[in-house]
Image (tube, rainbow, N blue to C red):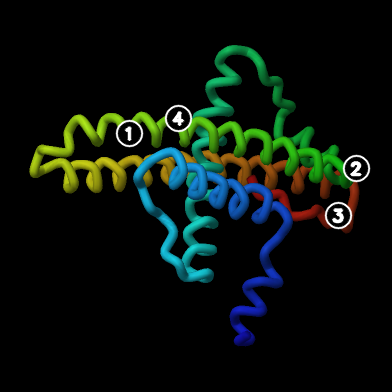
């Protein structure tokens, strides 16, 4: 194995495995079982990158769709981000609990994406005869991906700003604080 590849593998965290690679793999396998769509390339490395990317997109669907929906129906309660950062500093288990929480949200999003994929398969069968269907689907897919990552960027920027603000406030209270990485 090349040095670069070994470094990449070393950097894959448990969070990325639980919230990106496994959900992406589950989605691909179930999509291939439930629809005529074939996603896997047959190359282990290409498929791994594909699983990661699909899992990343599914994670964003969880963050942007599932989480917002559950907030709207009042099934979720969130503490202000500053409280999360302070709690994470005092109790390292908070981060682990948040990772598990995000994993559940991601698996809910896997199920939601499968519902949409099976629905898309049905819709595809209806419009398959149209000569313009493939470019329209590709264009729509690109727009959806752009919106998902744009909204994710906005949400992540708010988290980063909130975390920086909290760290600066904590630094006024105490010195030499080192907080763990808190990716969402």
Q: How far separated are the C-alphas under marks 3 and 4?
A: 45 Å
Circles 2 and 1: CB atoms closer than 8 Å: no
Kind of element beneath mark 3? loop
Q: Quadrant of residue 11?
A: bottom right
Kind of element beneath mark 2? loop
Q: Position of residue 91 (x, y in %)?
A: 90, 42
Disc 3: which residue: 177
Query: Where is 53 relative to 128, above or below?
Result: below
Q: Residue at x 67, y 39 (%)?
A: 102
Disc 2: which residue: 91
Q: How far separated are the C-alphas under marks 4 and 1?
A: 8 Å
Within 10 Å of the Cα at label 1, are there few (<14), some (14-19), or many (20+) other Cα atoms? few
Q: How far separated are the C-alphas under marks 2 and 1?
A: 44 Å
Q: Quadrant of residue 175?
A: bottom right
Circles 4 and 1: CB atoms closer than 8 Å: no
Q: Residue at x 49, y 49 (%)?
A: 28
Task: Give the foreground label among 2 and 1.
Answer: 1
């Amino acid at each position: 194995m090349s040095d670069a590849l070994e470094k990449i593998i070393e950097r894959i965290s448990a969070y990325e495995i639980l919230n990106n690679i496994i959900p992406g793999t589950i989605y691909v396998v179930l999509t291939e079982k439930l629809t005529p769509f074939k996603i896997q390339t047959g190359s282990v490395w290409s498929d791994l990158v594909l699983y990661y990317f699909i899992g990343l997109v599914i994670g964003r669907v969880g963050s942007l769709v599932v989480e917002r929906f559950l907030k709207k129906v009042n099934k979720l309660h969130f503490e202000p981000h500053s409280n999360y950062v302070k709690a994470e500093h005092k109790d390292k288990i908070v981060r682990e609990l948040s990772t598990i929480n995000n994993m559940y949200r991601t698996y809910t999003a896997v199920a939601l994406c499968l519902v949409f994929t099976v629905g898309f398969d049905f819709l595809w069968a209806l419009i398959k005869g149209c000569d313009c269907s493939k470019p329209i689907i590709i264009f729509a897919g690109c727009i959806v991906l752009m919106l998902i990552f744009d909204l994710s960027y906005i949400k992540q920027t708010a988290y980063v700003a909130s975390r920086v603000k909290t760290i600066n406030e904590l630094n006024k209270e105490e010195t030499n604080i080192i907080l763990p990485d808190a990716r969402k």
